[in-house]
C-alpha cells in the first residue's frame, strides 16, 4: 500500500495544480473588475450628468441572402470523389449502343486527328460540310495521343493497347459526367441551402437516374453540353433576379461587386462554349438572361450586357480560329448547323416525330421515376411565376426554371426531328424543381411502411432500367467489333483482313472500336440528299435503303461474282454465283431496274472474309449465298425488341472458309 506524499506529485497533478492556481487568479481578477464596474455604475446613477448622451440607432445594412457557393470542404470533396468513382465504374461497364453520334461526331474525327487520314476513320458528311465545332474531337484527339504515347512507352501488346485506347475516352467522359452530377448538386445547394434535404434529394436524383447511368458517360456532344450548362447555372448570379419589392437586396445604383463579376464571366463563358457545341443551347439562356435583365438594377443590367458581349466575343474568336485550323478554311459551324438542319430541312431525313413527342416521350425518358416530382415542381414553379412581388429568391429561381423548361421544350417541339437527348441540358433545371417534392415525401422519421415500399420501388425500378439499358439492350453491335478485333489480334499469319457490315448505316461504332488499321472494313452508307431539290426528296434512297429494298438485287449489282470454292461441287458453287448474276434490281420509289450492262458499270466490291448482319437478314443471305464457302462462325444477342425492323434479332457473322 502506497502512502500519499504531497511533496512528490506527478506531472499530471503538477499541471493540474498550476491550472487551478491560474484559474483562481483569473477568477479573482474577474471579481475585481466586476466590483470596479459596479462602483462606476453606482457613481453614474448618483450623477446623471455623467451619463453619455443617447445616440440615434444607426440603420442596419440590408440583409443579403447567403449563397453557399462553397459548402463544407470535406463534404464537397468526399461527394466529388465518390461521384467520380461512380462514373468511372459507370463508363467502364457500359456495354450497349445508343446513338451513332456517340462515335461519328466525336471519336471518329478525333481518331483521324490523332493517327492521320490513312488511319481508317469514318468521316461523315457533317464534317465535310463544317456543321460541327472542332472543339469536341480536338479534346478526344488529345486523349488518343496521350493513350498512344503511354502504350508506346510501356510497350504494351496489341490487345492491351486496344484496351487502353478503348478506355481512355470513357474515362475522360466520366470526368464530364462527374461534373454534371457535382455542379447540379452544388447549384441546388446554393438555392435551397447546403444542409437542406432538397439539396441531398437532388444528389439522389442524379446518381439514381437511369438516364444519367445510360447516357452521361457516352461521348455525345449533348453530354458535354449538359455538363457545361450545369456549371454555368451554378455561377450565374441568381440573387440579381430578386424582386425589388422583396427587400432582401440593395437595389440602389451601386453596381455588382468584383466577386460577382468574376462568377458572371465564368458563367457566360461556359454558356458560350455550350452554345458553340450545340447552337440550340442558346434557348436555355434566353429566358434566364431576359428574366435577370428585367428584375435586376440598372447598373447590373449594364454589367450583364457588357460581360455577355465581351465573353461571347472572346469565345467566338477563339473557336473560329481553331475551326479555321481544323477545316483549313474559314467556317462558322453554328450557322452552318442551322442552315443545313433547319433551312434545308436535312434533319428530317434522319426521322421526324409528333409535335407532342417531348411531352409524352422525351421528358418521361429523361426523368423516368422522377417524373411525378418534376411535374409537381413545374406546377409550383408556374404558381410562383404568376405571383407578383415574390418574397424569396427560391420562388424567383423556381419560376425562372419553369419558364426556361417550357420555352425550350416548346421551341424544340416546332422542329420535326426530335430526340430525347436534345433536352439533356434541362436536366439540372428539372432536378432543381423535383428535389423539394422528393425531399418532402421522405421527410418523416421513421418512414411509414407505405413510404418504405415506395422508396424501395423507386430505387429498384431505376436500377433495373439502368442495368438493362446499359448492359443488355443493343449490346451485340458493340460485341461484334470486339470479336472481330480479337480475331485480328489472334490470327497466326498476316494478310488481308476484310469485313463488310450489311446493316443499316452507322449501326456499329467504327475505327474507335476496330482500332487496327489493318482491319479493312466497309459498311452501307446513308448520305443525305444535299443537292436534291425539296420536291424530289420523297423519291431519294440512300445506299442502305437501296440495299434493303431488294438485298439480292443489290448484291448482284454491287458485289463481284462469287468464285466456286467448294470441293467436289463446283456446279453448286457456280449455281450460287449464277443466281446472283441472273438477278436484276427491282425498282421502288424511283429506283429503276438495271440490265446486265448497267450492272457492269457500277463499282463492284470484292467479297470480304467476314460478313456481319442482323438476324432479320439471315433468310435472305442463306438463299443468296447457298453453296458458297460462307458459314456462320459467330452469333450474339443484340436486343429483345427494336423499333427499326431492319435491326431486329441477333448479330451474326459469316466467315469465308478457305478451300
Image (cartoon, rainbow, N blue to C red):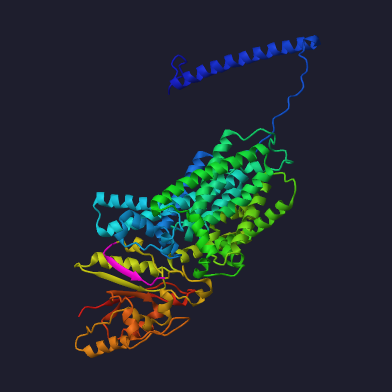
Picture residue at 52% right of the left edge, 19% below the top? 19
Horizontal and vertical percent position of residue 189 = 58, 45
Q: In which quarter of the image is residue 561?
A: bottom left
Picture residue at 54% right of the left edge, 63% below the top? 343
Q: In this view, does 356 lie to the left or right of 160?
A: right
Which residue is more in the foreground, 123 or 373?
123
| Above-or-below relation of 226 to 527 | above
Q: Is residue 566 left or right of residue 263?
A: left
Which residue is more in the foreground, 523 or 333?
333
499 in the magenta segment: no
- Count how many numbered circles sit on residues in the image: 0
Q: Which of the image's four quarters has the C terminus?
A: bottom left
Which residue is more in the foreground, 445 or 414?
414
Horizontal and vertical percent position of residue 531 = 46, 69
523 in the magenta segment: yes
Horizontal and vertical percent position of residue 414 = 60, 64
Q: In which quarter of the image is residue 571?
A: bottom left
Q: Which of the image's four quarters has the N terminus?
A: top left
| Above-or-below relation of 192 to 611 | above
Residue 285 visible, this orientation = yes
Horizontal and vertical percent position of residue 76 = 51, 43
Residue extent of the magenta highlight: 516-525
Which residue is more in the foreground, 524 or 419?
524
| Above-or-below relation of 67 to 323 | above
Residue 182 visible, this orientation = no
Amino acid at each position: 500500500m502506497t502512502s500519499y506524499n504531497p511533496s512528490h506529485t506527478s506531472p499530471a497533478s503538477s499541471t493540474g495544480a498550476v491550472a487551478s492556481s491560474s484559474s483562481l487568479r483569473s477568477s479573482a481578477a474577474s471579481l475585481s473588475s466586476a466590483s470596479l464596474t459596479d462602483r462606476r455604475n453606482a457613481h453614474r446613477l448618483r450623477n446623471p450628468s455623467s451619463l453619455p448622451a443617447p445616440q440615434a440607432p444607426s440603420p442596419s445594412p440590408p440583409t443579403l441572402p447567403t449563397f453557399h457557393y462553397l459548402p463544407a470542404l470535406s463534404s464537397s470533396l468526399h461527394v466529388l470523389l465518390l461521384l467520380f468513382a461512380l462514373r468511372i465504374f459507370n463508363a467502364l461497364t457500359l456495354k450497349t449502343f445508343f446513338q451513332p453520334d456517340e462515335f461519328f461526331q466525336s471519336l471518329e474525327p478525333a481518331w483521324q486527328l490523332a493517327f492521320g487520314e490513312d488511319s481508317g476513320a469514318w468521316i461523315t458528311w457533317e464534317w465535310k460540310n463544317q456543321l460541327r465545332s472542332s472543339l469536341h474531337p480536338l479534346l478526344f484527339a488529345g486523349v488518343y495521343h496521350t493513350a498512344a504515347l503511354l502504350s508506346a512507352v510501356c510497350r504494351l501488346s496489341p490487345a492491351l493497347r486496344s484496351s487502353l485506347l478503348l478506355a481512355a475516352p470513357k474515362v475522360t467522359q466520366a470526368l464530364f459526367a462527374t461534373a454534371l452530377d457535382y455542379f447540379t448538386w452544388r447549384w441546388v445547394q446554393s438555392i435551397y441551402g447546403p444542409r437542406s434535404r432538397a439539396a441531398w434529394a437532388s444528389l439522389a436524383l442524379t446518381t439514381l437516374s437511369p438516364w444519367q447511368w445510360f447516357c452521361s458517360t457516352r461521348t455525345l456532344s449533348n453530354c458535354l453540353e449538359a455538363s457545361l450548362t450545369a456549371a454555368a447555372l451554378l455561377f450565374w448570379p441568381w440573387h440579381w433576379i430578386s424582386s425589388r419589392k422583396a427587400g432582401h437586396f440593395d437595389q440602389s445604383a451601386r453596381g455588382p461587386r468584383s466577386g460577382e463579376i468574376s462568377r458572371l464571366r465564368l458563367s457566360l463563358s461556359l454558356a458560350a462554349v455550350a452554345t458553340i457545341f450545340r447552337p440550340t443551347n442558346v434557348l436555355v439562356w434566353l429566358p434566364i438572361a431576359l428574366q435577370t435583365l428585367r428584375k435586376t438594377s440598372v447598373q447590373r443590367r449594364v454589367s450583364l450586357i457588357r460581360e455577355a458581349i465581351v465573353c461571347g466575343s472572346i469565345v467566338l474568336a477563339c473557336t473560329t480560329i481553331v475551326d479555321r485550323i481544323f477545316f483549313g478554311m474559314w467556317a462558322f459551324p453554328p450557322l452552318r448547323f442551322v442552315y443545313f438542319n433547319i433551312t434545308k430541312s436535312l434533319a428530317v431525313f434522319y426521322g421526324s416525330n409528333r409535335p407532342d413527342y417531348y411531352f409524352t416521350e422525351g421528358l418521361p425518358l429523361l426523368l423516368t421515376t422522377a417524373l411525378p416530382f418534376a411535374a409537381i415542381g413545374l406546377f409550383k414553379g408556374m404558381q410562383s411565376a404568376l405571383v407578383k412581388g415574390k418574397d424569396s429568391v427560391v420562388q424567383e429561381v423556381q419560376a425562372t426554371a419553369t419558364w426556361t423548361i417550357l420555352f425550350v421544350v416548346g421551341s424544340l417541339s416546332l422542329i420535326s426531328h426530335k430526340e430525347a437527348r436534345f433536352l439533356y441540358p434541362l436536366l439540372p433545371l428539372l432536378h432543381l424543381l423535383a428535389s423539394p417534392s422528393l425531399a418532402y415525401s421522405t421527410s418523416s422519421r421513421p418512414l411509414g411502411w407505405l413510404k418504405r415500399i415506395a422508396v424501395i420501388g423507386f430505387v429498384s425500378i431505376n436500377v433495373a432500367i439502368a442495368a438493362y439499358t446499359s448492359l443488355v439492350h443493343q449490346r451485340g453491335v458493340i460485341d461484334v467489333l470486339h470479336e472481330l478485333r480479337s480475331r485480328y489480334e489472334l490470327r497466326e499469319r498476316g494478310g488481308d483482313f476484310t469485313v463488310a457490315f450489311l446493316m443499316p448505316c452507322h449501326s456499329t461504332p467504327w475505327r474507335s472500336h476496330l482500332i487496327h488499321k489493318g482491319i479493312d472494313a466497309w459498311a452501307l452508307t446513308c448520305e443525305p440528299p444535299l443537292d436534291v431539290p425539296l420536291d424530289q426528296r420523297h423519291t431519294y434512297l440512300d445506299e442502305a435503303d437501296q440495299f434493303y429494298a431488294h438485298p439480292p438485287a443489290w448484291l448482284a449489282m454491287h458485289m463481284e461474282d462469287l468464285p466456286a470454292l467448294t470441293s467436289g461441287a463446283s456446279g453448286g458453287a457456280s449455281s450460287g454465283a449464277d443466281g446472283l448474276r441472273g438477278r436484276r434490281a427491282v425498282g421502288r420509289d424511283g429506283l429503276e431496274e438495271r440490265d446486265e450492262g448497267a450492272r457492269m458499270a457500277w463499282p463492284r466490291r470484292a467479297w470480304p472474309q467476314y460478313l456481319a448482319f442482323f438476324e432479320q437478314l439471315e433468310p435472305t443471305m442463306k438463299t443468296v449465298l447457298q453453296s458458297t464457302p460462307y458459314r456462320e462462325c459467330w452469333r450474339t444477342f443484340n436486343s429483345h425488341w427494336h423499333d427499326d425492323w431492319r435491326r431486329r434479332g441477333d448479330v451474326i457473322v459469316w466467315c469465308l472458309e478457305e478451300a
